[in-house]
Amino acid sequence: MKKYIIIILLSLMLFAVGPAGSYELVLNNTPTKVCFSPKGRCTESIIKEIDQAKNNIFVQAYSFTAAPIAKALVDAHKRGLHVEVILDKSQRSQKYTSASFLANSRVPTYIDADHAIAHNKIIIIDKETVITGSFNFTKNAESNNAENLIILKSKDLAEIYINNWQAHRSHSEEYKPRY
């Protein structure tokens, strides 16, 4: 079996908790999946990971209109998992966003308005799986756009992403649906 070493340089902006920083990790034998769209089955891969979650799911998203991903998160919440979502402020006014669906389904949903754009596309599952890349959680990302998604299984990497998620959560405000 070949050994793969992945070196990841992450630039994380920790605005509310700690300074901005970079982290360099050597991830030995880290299970990794990579998807490319259009039609790379990225959405299907995300839903599979959400459906396998056992404890918690933390999401940061810029554009979130993919109903299948939102439904998978609501289903996870209904199974008793701890699910929280942080979205960009554009989700307040954008049509067909998943923000209202999530909030109305009692999934804690927040808006990060502290930045020009909260451009993250991250899902952290069970403090072990990190899903990230350019892939927006939208139908267009799956069907029309050239985007990428990477799924990594690493507790060390997940811890860095959770700390960053918590920093953004600390300055985000609760999303209140208009209807």
Image: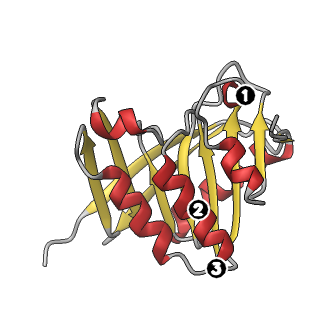
Gap in angstroms between the C-alphas marked 2 and 3 = 10 Å
Instruction: Report the front residue among 17 and 64.
Output: 64
Who's the residue at 76% across and 51% down the image?
103
- For badge 3, the amino acid type reads Arg
Q: Secondary structure at mark 3?
A: loop
Which residue in the protein does label 2 denote? 73
Precedes in sequence: disc 1 or disc 3: 3
With respect to residue 112, does 116 lie above or below? above
Q: Nearer the viewer, residue 60 or 163?
A: 60
From the viewer's perspective, tell me whether residue 31 is left or right of residue 11: left
Q: Please tell me in which quadrant of the rendered image residue 38 appears.
A: top left
Q: Is the residue marked by circle 2 packed among few (<14), some (14-19), or many (20+) residues within 10 Å?
A: many
Q: Which mark is residue 41?
A: none
Local SS, label 1: helix
Asked whether, in this view, residue 126 is left or right of residue 40, the answer is right
Seen at 85% across and 46% down, the residue is 170
Q: Residues at badges 1 and 3 in contact (C-beta under 8 Å)?
A: no
According to the image, label 1 marks what residue? Answer: 89
- In space, the residues marked 2 and 1 are separated at their CA atoms by 20 Å
Residue 19 x, y percent position in the rendering:
76, 38
The residues bearing labels 1 and 3 have C-alpha atoms spaced at a distance of 28 Å
Mark 1 or 3: the one toward you: 3
Look at the numbered discs 2 and 1 and tell me whether their residues touch, using CB distance below 8 Å.
no
Compared to residue 115, the image places residue 19 above or below, namely below
Give whichever of discs 2 and 1 has the lower sequence position.
2
Q: Quadrant of the C terminus?
A: top right
Which residue was labeled with disc 3? 79
**Kind of residue indicated by mark 1:** Lys
Tell me what residue is drawn at x 45 percent, y 43 percent.
9
